[in-house]
Image: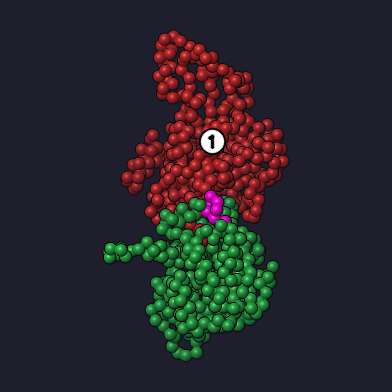
Chain colours: A red, B green
Amino acid sequence: IAFSRFHSSIRVRPNDKDAKMKYQECNKIVKQKAFERAIASDELKRSVVDSLDIENMTIEDDYAGPKLEDGKVTLKFMKDLMAWFKDQKKLHRKCAYQTEEITICGDTHGQYYDLLNIFELNGLPSITNPYLFNGDFVDRGSFSVEVILTLFGFKLLYPEHFHLLRGNHETDNMNQMYGFEGEVKAKYTAQMFQLFSEVFQWLPLAQCINSKVLVMHGGLFSEDGVTLDDIRKIDRNRQPPDSGKTMCVLLQDGRSVSKRGVSCQFGPDVTERFLEQNKLQYIVRSHEVKAEGYEVTHSGKCITVFSAPNYCDQMGNKGAYIHLRGSDLKPEFHQFTAVPHPDVKPMAYANSLMQLGMM
Amino acid sequence: MSNGMRMPFADSDIADEAVRATCDDASICKRFATSKGYWTDLYVQYFVRQVGERKAPEINRGYYGRVKGMNLLIDAFLKKTQCDCQVVNLGAGLDTTFWRLKDENIMPKKFFEVDFPMIVARKIHNIKTKPPLSKPLIETHSTDALLLDGHSLDSDRYCIIGADLRDLPTLEEKLKKFQINPELPTLFLSECVLVYMTPEQSSKLVHWVADAFPTAMFINYEQVNMNDRFGEIMIENLQRRQCNLAGVDLCQSLDSQKERFLSAGWESANALDMMTVYNMLPQEDVARIECLEFLDEKELLQQLLQHYCICWAVKDKLNLGEASILPS
């Protein structure tokens, strides 16, 4: 909330030093949170959660108490719960145990109205409705500023339940070519873009869920033997280096991949070995548009999720997001289609990329 | 006009205006792409002064494919006829091919360009006022003065005519006026032109060409494979810009593109989608241009290229041999 207030005040008074300073404070916090999370090691202590089989618990027909709505805590549930407890009744253990579900989204690429639609369909982020956005929040779409400030806002609001990973479009080269830099300069200043550039450098490169599922934007490496520790050790506060280095492969940045043909730079055998070596079940990545919004490959070991429907107003693809239950980590896919967006008046950043083909 | 009250702008006027605007799309994109080094065009800068805002890399690569593909076919025709031929560029817009051919010393006997009078007037103004454009015309002209009026310019080797391609009698009359020789092998070009006319109108046009020119080739670049989602969205997006693809029914497939010629008096026809053409271009140069700008999503280029094609049809009284027209 603090973040968006600063944001609106900066909007109204773009040159207000005080607003800018507070914006900078916010960004420091973003950086700090990102850093802390990245360096935290995952605990390998066995959790009670592993021994629970919540999915297969049944609620008896004669249970008349409050139930979670679609697995989620809602205001109605809370009011019913409080009334139920007041009558000294017991909440069904399934509802008590209900583990968190996390929603993983792929590329959003400045498609703000489609992002709003995700929140419409899947609920606003909250402590009980955590999200992970897997990079490429900006560029291509004309509302990159709105998207990134919204995502940063939620990060500040729910630092432990709202996660952002860096994509190859959270880099200077991409932002210069694909619209974000132009958009920020048009809506704010060059200095503001510099700030975004700095904050992007602090975004973590990968996230491991329950020690079993690794999420990163681009994908895996062409060579074997990379461990989670190697990833942890990456000095990521920088622009991606030239080809060959782990960091740029995680982002699948341009220079690290061959420019011709092959879309997936890592084969099923690479995935298999990586998962085995690091004791993981599967990876989730994004980075490539998919007609259905998602794709399952490498015998279920590699999942692609892409959340920008009708990409670039041209591709006609669906968007998708993944529900991941902590209990079994089985991915559940949800698809959605594009919603209308305002016809942005031609501006340097917006119009240049909205090309209707060859004329 | 049933009640005598005429609307200030008929729907057809709006439609024509939208089509004319596509001339700017093409030349602006070419201006940007050439400024980035995708291909060399020394003359587009005299038609589009400013480089303008950035275009997406897939658009630049798309235009590269188009220009290189068309040039390959044009040059092959010129070579095959040893320049003892004519070229007629229908809906030429601000195209610079004539000036390229002059520089490369492979000019046809005469190069004709046809477009809406408004576009032609603009182009003539540019030619008149820019020495790099007018000099090649003057150099190749036998007298001191070029024949010039508001909507046409004629010289020995280059002629530009303002006309409506849907009005064939007038088109024919004007071409004759400027000494087109139907006996010479003639190459007709149209790039994103026929698609803006109804199938009936374009059919009449290509039929007339076949009837009037015994030895001819027609090269058509435009949309194809429009039956899918990508095609649907393109049509919708263009409609929002009042741009109506009136002839899109003929853009269903490579076969439908060929058929429009085969059923209009042309002896043979070939068509390739731009993905195929792109992969047939000299790959060293393709590798060079792909390094100019990193393309973040290959799928965008692929979809774009698969929805455009080059189709060429031949009427071959003098046995030019269409099969060998395209270098393998």
| Residue type (three-letter) at the residue carrying disc 1 | His
| Residue B221 figure quarter | bottom right
What percent of the width, then of the height, locates residue A246? 63, 44
Count the numbered circles shown. 1
The residue furthest bottom is B143
Question: B208 or B120, which is in the foreground?
Answer: B208
Q: Is residue A46 above or below residue B13?
A: above
Q: Is residue A13 magenta?
A: no
**Quarter of the figure that contains the C terminus of chain B:** bottom right
What percent of the width, then of the height, locates residue B264? 57, 69
In this orientation, does residue A154 appear?
A: no
Q: Specify start and end residues of the magenta stretch as a single range.
A: B225-231
What percent of the width, then of the height, locates residue A271? 68, 39
Question: B111 or A132, which is in the foreground?
Answer: B111
The residue furthest top is A88
The residue furthest front is B2
| Residue B256 figure quarter | bottom right
In this orientation, does residue A204 appear?
A: yes
What percent of the width, then of the height, locates residue B262? 60, 67
Q: Residues within 10 Å of mark 1 (few under 14, many from 20)?
A: some
Q: Which residue is mark 1?
A: A334
Q: Is residue A199 above or below residue B2?
A: above
Q: Residue at x 70, y 37 (%)?
A: A272
Question: A69 or A20, which is in the foreground?
Answer: A69
